[in-house]
Amino acid sequence: MPPRASKRKSAPPTSSSVTSSDGRSVSSKAKTKGMEKIDRLFDSYANSSLGMIDPDGIESLCSDLGVDYTDVRILMLAWKLKAEKQGYFTQDEWRTGLKALGVDSLSKLKKALPELENEVGKPSNYEDFYSYAFRYCLTEEKQKSVDIESICELLNLVLGAQFRPQVDLLIEYLKVQSDYKVINLDQWNNFLRFCKEISFPDLENYDASQAWPLILDNFVEWRREKHS
């Protein structure tokens, strides 16, 4: 039976003014409980001696999520967590990322992956994710470039679904050319710009006099010679 209403009129309590027997607001307790669940999930994958989720923990997480370790959605998760070190998630990164996703359990995280894909796919987010993918591969201090083999794998992972013909040809070129051993961020970002702006396979609107990196001038020349 509901309690009898008081005859005195008073303002309805706000969520912050509703308190439990221990004096804490109900909303505060709910937030604390949610964070505790996020922390328990973190602890189930974390290396206790490191205080973070390491590559083995991420591999276990992937297995439980039913995705491959090299699945692009794991890279998307790292982007959402703003993970700074490849193959590692700190507790702060985990808390911030899962809170932003609105999840506190493995089942909820699994259900959130398609939504995360949609979020990354938005034009306003995709370029940031694309640049992040490169920076995530910078594993050494002051490292500014990534080796060709890793770049080929990364191109396939983050651009392959959208621009398969361009990516396949670009990877073929990168593997046969001998002028470049590594790729920098500017070159990497221009690969995306090239895929978005240049007509393919004819490359008719490619103008070498514009601000394209030399590696793409060489790629276009190689492509034209190959099909002349």
Image (spheres, grey):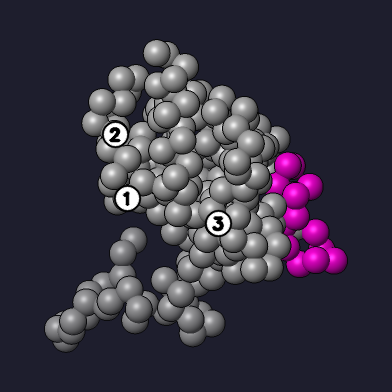
Which residue is found at the position 70% from the left and 62% from the top? Answer: 140
For the N terminus, the quadrant is bottom left
Q: Position of residue 55 (x, y in %)?
A: 75, 49
Q: Is residue 68 above or below residue 5?
A: above
- The segment highlighted magenta reads 47-60
Q: Which residue is mark 3?
A: 135
The circle drawn on residue 206 is 2
Residue at image coords 50%, 72%: 29
Dividing the picture into quarters, in which one does residue 25 lie?
Answer: bottom left
Residue at position x 42%, y 13% in the image: 227
Q: CA distance from mark 3 to mark 1?
A: 22 Å
Q: Is residue 206 above or below residue 88?
A: above
Checking the image for residue 63, the label placed there is none
Q: Amino acid at mark 3?
A: Arg
Q: Are marks 3 and 2 in contact (CB under 8 Å)?
A: no
Work out how far the residue at label 3 is from the one at label 2, CA to CA, in angstroms: 27 Å
Percent x, y of residue 9: 14, 83
The amino acid type, in three-letter code, at marker 1 is Ala
Q: Earlier in the sequence, mark 2 or mark 1?
A: 2
Q: Answer whether residue 197 is magenta in the image.
A: no
Considering depth in this image, is 100 or 157 the residue closer to the camera? 157
The residue mark sitting in front, 3 or 1, is 1
Image position, residue 95 (x, y; %): 56, 64
Q: Which residue is mark 1?
A: 211
Q: Earlier in the sequence, mark 3 or mark 1?
A: 3
Please tell me whether residue 11 is drawn above or below residue 39 in the rendered image: below
